[in-house]
Amino acid sequence: MIVLGLGSNLNSSYGDRFNNINHALSTLESYKIKILLKSSLYETPSYPNNNDPRFINMVIGISTNLKPEELAAASISVEESLERKRNYKNEPRTCDIDIIDYNGQIINFKYKNFDFNVPHVNLIYRNFVLFPLKEILPEWKHPKTKEPIDLIINKLSDVDKKSILKIKKP
C-alpha cells in the first residue's frame, strides 16, 4: 500500500490547520488518488522549536497509478495550493505531505530541487507518523529493516511516546 503523512500547524486562506488537512485530502483525490484508509488526527509539539504552533498530523493509505515522481509532484502541488512556504528547514507550515511508504519499495529520487527518500530516513523517530500509521496498518513493517511497527514505536523516547495526543476536530 502507498502511505502518505499529512501535517499542518499554520492557518491558510482556507482556514485553520483542520481545514488545511481536509482541503489537502480533497485536492489529493483530484489527482486520481483514492483514499482507502484514514487515521485519526494527532497533535504534537513542533520540532525542533516547541514554541512554534502545535502540529496536527494524520496518515492515509492510498491507491493510485501515479509513479513516485508523479505522486511527489502532486503532493508538492497540493502543498503549494495551501500556500506552503519553504524558507528554512522545519519551519511552521500550512501543509506538509510526505510519502511514507510506496508499496514497500525503497526509492530515492530527485524532483525539482527536492530529494525524496522513501521510506523517509527519519521515519523511525517520528511519533506523528508512527502512531497514526499503526492505527491504520497495525502489521506494517519498515521496508528497509523489516522491523514491525510495534518494535519501532517501542524504541521511541518516553517523551515522544507521551507528547502525542489523538484529537478530534473542535
Image: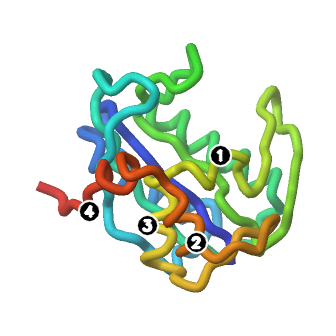
Question: Alpha carbon of mark 4 to alpha carbon of mark 3: how far?
Answer: 9 Å
User: Label 4 to label 1, Cα distance in Å?
Assistant: 21 Å
Report which residue position mark 2 lands on.
151
Q: Are marks 2 and 1 in contact (CB under 8 Å)?
A: no
In the picture of the structure, the residue carrying the numbered disc 4 is 166
Mark pair 3, 2: CA separation: 15 Å
Three-letter code for the amino acid on which mark 3 is drawn: Pro
- Element at badge 1? loop
For badge 1, the amino acid type reads: Asn
**Element class at badge 4:** strand
Residue at numbered disc 1: 122
What secondary structure is marked by label 2?
helix
Q: Position of residue 162 (x, y in %)?
A: 30, 54
Q: Upstream in the sequence, badge 1 or badge 3?
A: 1
In the picture, measured across the screen, residue 61 lies left or right of residue 122, that is: left
In the image, residue 123 sits, relative to residue 14, either above or below, namely below
Q: Quadrant of the C terminus?
A: bottom left
Q: Earlier in the sequence, mark 2 or mark 1?
A: 1
Along the viewing direction, whichever of 27 and 110 lies nearer the viewer: 110
Q: Of label 4 and label 3, which has the lower sequence position?
A: 3
Residue at 32% x, 31% y is 10
Label 2, label 1: how far apart the Cα atoms are: 15 Å
| 89 up-or-down from 20: above or below | above
